Image (spheres, helix red, strand yellow):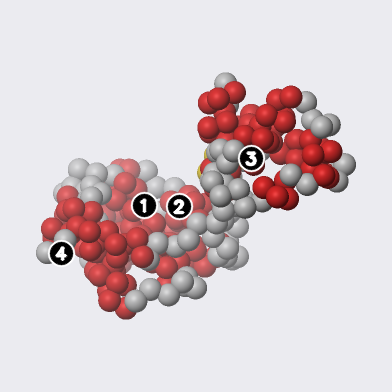
Amino acid sequence: MPLNKVEIPGVNTAKLPVLGNLKMRELFRELQGGNCEAREQLISGNLRLVLSVIQRFQNRGEHSDDLFQVGCIGLMKAIDNFDLGQNVKFSTYAVPMIIGEIRRYLRDNSPIRVSRSLRDVAYKALQVRDALVHRFAKEPNVGEIAEEMGLPREDVLYALDAIQEPMSLYEPIYHDGGDPIFVMDQISDEKNVDRSWLEGIAIREAMRRLNEREKRILTMRFFHGKTQMEVADEIGISQAQVSRLEKAALNHMRKYM
């Protein structure tokens, strides 16, 4: 079974076992009865779940094997804290814990420095969040976390925002089978800092060689500072089409510059 080519050194991902729901519940009952071997089977039987989660973090510049190891820590925490009495699938419970563990790892390795007091509040909030997930088998909102901590909602929200890892402008956010759309494609240029460059003679000469629709798209994007979504709405085509036309027009212009 292919897994989008996530490769982990020393792990044959194609041969990882998959546990059915009935087998999982049987192993959890054995684990709660003190069978340590059942825990090992639960871990190995859910490694594919870890692989599916780390695919979300493939564009963060981290090695897959590092993310895999951190994700396995989240998996083990989920196994040790899972309550069979809650009417919820294990994967539903485990995925947020695996994601949380990976996000903590990324925050701890972020080059952006955050004050110790903010980090303490944020990490306490994450611990409370995990406890509430375990207690109610659902994702709590910030207000519920703040109430449990006895802090104002704004303080908790500010602390959590402060430790969020930065997102790359080149991180893809949509893919329709053609060219991907990146974060930078969603940002409008309201200051038009490159206006003087775009109005240069070479640019004007190159733009004359474009068709009317291409000229209109580039003018709206780079002279009027509109996002691809705004351009798509005005022209009456999809955002993916705007992205492809924009890239094709820029590549065409480069031939004459």
Measure how far apart labels 3 and 4 are at the Cα level: 46 Å
Q: Which kind of residue does numbered mark 4 sit on?
A: Leu
Say if 52 sits above or below 111 in the image.
above
Where does the image place residue 30, in percent across and percent down from the top left? 25, 58
- Can I make out residue 131 in this image? no
- Percent position of residue 39, x then y: 33, 62
201 vs 47: above or below = above
**Frontmost residue, 257 versus 124:** 257
Circle 4 residue:
151
Q: Nearer the viewer, mark 3 or mark 1?
A: 3
Residue lying at 44% horizontally and 48% vertically, measured from the top left: 18
Among numbered discs 1 and 2, the one appearing first in the sequence: 2
Residue at image position (71%, 39%) is 247
- The numbered mark, 4 or 1, whose residue comes first in the sequence reads 1
Q: Is residue 163 visible?
A: yes
Left/right of residue 180 with respect to residue 253 in the rendered view:
left
Q: Going from the N terminus, do you reach mark 3 or mark 1 first?
A: 1
The disc label shown at residue 95, or none? 1
Q: Residues within 10 Å of mark 1 (few under 14, many from 20)?
A: some
Q: Nearer the viewer, residue 24 or 243?
A: 243
Q: Nearer the viewer, residue 43 or 63?
A: 63
